[in-house]
Image (cartoon, coloured by chain):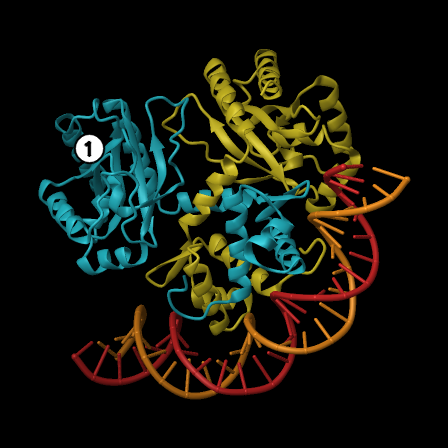
Chain colours: A yellow, B cyan, C red, D orange
Amino acid sequence: MPEHGRELTTTATSLRIVDVINQLEGARMSEIAAELDLANSTVHAHLTTLANRELVMKEGNEFHLGIKFFHLGEQARHRKPEYEIVRRHAHELSNRLNEEVAFAITEHGRSVIIFDENNDPAKEGFQVGRYFHMHNSASGKAMLAEWSRERVDEVLDRWGLPAETENTIQSTEELYEELERTRDRGYSLNRQEALEGLMAVGMAITNPDGSVLGSLDVSGPPYRLSEEQIVPELSETVTQIEREIESR
Amino acid sequence: MPEHGRELTTTATSLRIVDVINQLEGARMSEIAAELDLANSTVHAHLTTLANRELVMKEGNEFHLGIKFFHLGEQARHRKPEYEIVRRHAHELSNRLNEEVAFAITEHGRSVIIFDENNDPAKEGFQVGRYFHMHNSASGKAMLAEWSRERVDEVLDRWGLPAETENTIQSTEELYEELERTRDRGYSLNRQEALEGLMAVGMAITNPDGSVLGSLDVSGPPYRLSEEQIVPELSETVTQIEREIESR
DNA sequence: TATAAATATTCACGAGAGGCGAATTTTAAC
DNA sequence: GTTAAAATTCGCCTCTCGTGAATATTTATA
């Protein structure tokens, strides 16, 4: 996993413990020790440290992720004022189209939806906070299409092209072509490549300096989503967003 | 800060670095080193580790909180299925009252709002994810009122009674009396004790086993909020929630 | 309730990793 | 293009982390 530079094994171990707690959705000390092949006493010291810093909480004898992650996560989610601008426009677009609109950003070669605006506020977007691979989501492809071949290759080297459905793009060449098509038509498509029964239309949002801020996508069931209706509205929204960002 | 047990200084240092990045809303390596009085090379190693694990991201030469915090935070936010039940009811209550309804949980002696339901979906509750002290919020007092004197004292020992406004309760005796009144009337009140111009009515939500799951509060400007209107509705909602939780 | 098994916590010690300062490279400022 | 500041690498020494054994506590079973 270490990309470069010196890794501090102690910190790395603590973070592996956090990952295990997350994966197991709560875990006892001995479970964690067994999972990571560490001595009980070692895990004990790590958990004590993590709990004192509120990253982890103890309920009975089970350890869980602490709400401090939520606290820090919300900070990350609102880090840039641009995000809030996007959210407002995404909300309006969602109302106009009566479809789900998601805003995703990317880090370390994967993307995460940080806002999901929905016409039905009673339901929450279930993909918010999940990691997605770039090659099988509309948002991801929209961003990849804006990047240099070099940067795309870095992502492929690190994450490969794992298949989620039978429609997932599985070869490098195919992906390059798809990105070319995306650039030509001006928007990206996800045709049930990540989830059966879900398609999406995506467009990247670019900063004034040309870098990519993130990506908007409109998603829904294939029978309901028509490119002809959605693309002009989405395109208009992205233009407005970029204008508003620039005029700040 | 260490409550008990052995602290691993390496992990603790890494987490202090995360806190500094959070407080400074992004920081350069040398800033962090200066702030924590550490050698540049030391901070470098920590940041390398944190970045490899995606907890931290580098933008230019500034380090920022990584979206992995958001990812893990969302996991924490949805940890218990009960939370989603509460959210649904809170949403309905918000629609009925046309006021803001927040759901807070507590950990390590402070509380955090994890859901904020609002009649106007264009705006987001700005307190979501913030830490609150228990003694100056309606949610906090509602939960304290359900706890043993012993447990309340633990909180006071750790966090004291910091004043946010001139209405904040500042003495232990006064707080004990307030909690007594809260138990008597069956709900808690926040009379501009945390924020000028904001009052709130709160009630704790208890699990079938008698422990406290969290707390709901309805908040708004004093001129609009009448206890007579709000309390019966809030009370009814809490009863429904507890029934639904029990019947799972 | 008593007993046994499993799990959690404490402790002291030795190996090895982390923290440091100096040297080098890179980035930013002028 | 020159200088200053910041980032990165490196090797060394000390101190800390990881460990297993011992103790305490919790959970399961009779």
Please state, as top left, top right, bottom left or bottom right, where the N terminus of chain A lies in the image. Answer: bottom right
SS at mark 1 in the image: helix
Image height of A171 relative to C3, above or below: above
Whole-percent x, y for residue A102 in the image: 53, 27
Going by the picture, which residue comes out furthest to the left? B184
Residue A197 visible at all? no
State left or right for residue A84 relative to residue A176: left
Image x and y of residue B236, in percent = 17, 33
In this view, A191 is above or below A154: above
Image quadrant assignment for residue A197: top right
Residue B190's quadrant in the figure? top left
Residue shown at 51%/21% (left/top)?
A: A90
Percent position (x, y) of residue B229? 15, 25
Q: How many marks?
A: 1
- Residue B189 lies, in percent from the top left, at 19, 37
* Residue type highlighted by circle 1: Leu
Quick one: B127 or A4, which is closer to the camera? B127
Image position of B96 with respect to B178: above or below: above
Q: Residues within 10 Å of mark 1 (few under 14, many from 20)?
A: many
Left or right of residue A4, residue B185 in this image: left
Q: Which residue is mark 1?
A: B234
Front position in the image: B220 or A35: B220
User: Does residue A63 appear in this view?
Assistant: yes
Report whether B148 appears left or right of A132. Answer: left
Quarter placement of the C terminus of chain A? top right
Q: Is residue B109 above or below residue B221?
A: below
Q: Which residue lies at the image location 57% right of the left edge and 13% below the top edge?
A: A233
- Report whether B177 appears left or right of A15: left
Residue in view at x 18 percent, y 58 percent: B149
Query: To which chain does the residue with label 1 belong?
Result: B
Q: Nearer the viewer, residue B223 or B68?
A: B223
